Each structure stands twice: as C-alpha cells, then as structure tokens.
Image (tube, helix red, strand yellow):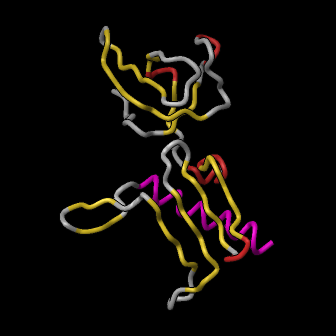
C-alpha cells in the first residue's frame, strides 16, 4: 500500500521506463486511483497527461534538502527589506519581513495559506509549515550574508 496522498511531492526512481519523466525533477501528485490492482498517480507538472504506477516514485520527505526547490518564484521587496516567495504550483505566497515581532523573530505574512478547522484559524498543512521554515532559511541566506 502506498503512503502517497494528493499534493505530495515525489521524484521518479526509474524514469527510463516513461516518456517525459526526469529522475532529477520534482513532481506533485494531482490524483490517485487504483487500476488493475495497482495504485497509479497523475502528476500535476508532468509534460504529458498520463497515469503512472506509484512504484515508480518515492516521496520527497522534506524540502530542507534544498529549500529553493519548494518555491516557483522568489522576489526581493527592496523597499521593505523583505522576500516574497510563491509556493510551487499552489499560488500560496509567504512574505518574510525584517520587522521584529515582540518575541524578537521575523514577521511572516501568509497569503492564501490559512484554512479554518473546527472554527479556528490555523495552518493545516505540514508541508506549508516546512515551506515557512525554508522561507525563513532563504531570508537568512540572502539578508544576513
């Protein structure tokens, strides 16, 4: 049984068997189905619209390996000494500012990220929490170098 879920980031472990699949590129799972007693995935950012066997992919556990791979666009907002990072293929924006919070940390704004769960506003996705960590890491690389 596969531990994949929609939205997971995966990498192909045997790209030679499939047209237009690179073993060094990250793919996002768009959909999952069971066909002929085999789980198959549809990839959001693949070159062709095709269902691939789950066994051909492994889940990328953490974006900490290379924090830049998690974002499709990174902009510097010079006037505010801030970064605007767009999360890959989802359109979420994370903005990291130099303004210090009362606790002494960075000010982080999340755009199109917040969800509601049990009438409480919270960040529901663990991948988004890791993306925020990576955004702060990239901010430190750029502004504290």
Q: Is residue 32 left or right of residue 69?
A: left
Q: Is residue 115 left or right of residue 66?
A: left
Q: Quadrant of the C terminus?
A: bottom right
Residue 31 point in image, percent of width and height: 37, 28
- Magenta-colored stretch includes residue 112: no
Residue at 50% over, 49% down: 91
Residue at 24% over, 68% down: 120
Residue 93 point in image, percent of width and height: 52, 58
Residue at 57% over, 50% down: 63
- Residue 75: name its quadrant: bottom right
User: Please, is residue 72 above or below residue 124 in the view?
Assistant: above
Q: Residue furthest right?
A: 145
What secondary structure is the stretch in magenta mostly built from? Answer: helix
Q: Residue furthest bottom?
A: 102
Residue 77 point in image, percent of width and height: 69, 68
Q: Is residue 89 left or right of residue 83?
A: left
- Front-most of residues 99 and 23: 99
Q: Quadrant of the N terminus?
A: top left
Residue 133 point in image, percent of width and height: 55, 64
Q: Which residues are magenta?
A: 126-145
User: Please, is residue 103 above or below residue 138 in the view?
Assistant: below
User: Please, is residue 34 above or below residue 105 in the view?
Assistant: above
């Amino acid at each position: 049984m596969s531990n994949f879920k929609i939205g997971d980031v995966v990498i192909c472990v045997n790209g030679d068997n499939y047209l237009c699949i690179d073993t060094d590129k990250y793919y996002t799972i768009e959909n999952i189905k069971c066909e002929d007693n085999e789980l198959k995935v549809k990839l959001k950012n693949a070159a062709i619209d095709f269902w691939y066997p789950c066994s051909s992919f492994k889940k990328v556990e953490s974006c900490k390996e290379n924090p830049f791979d998690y974002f499709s666009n990174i902009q510097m907002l010079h006037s505010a000494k801030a970064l605007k990072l767009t999360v890959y293929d989802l359109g979420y924006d994370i903005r990291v500012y130099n303004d210090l919070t009362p606790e002494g940390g960075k000010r982080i704004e999340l755009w199109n990220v917040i969800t509601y769960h049990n009438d409480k506003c919270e960040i529901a996705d663990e991948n988004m929490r890791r993306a925020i960590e990576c955004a702060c890491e990239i901010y430190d690389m750029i502004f504290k170098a």
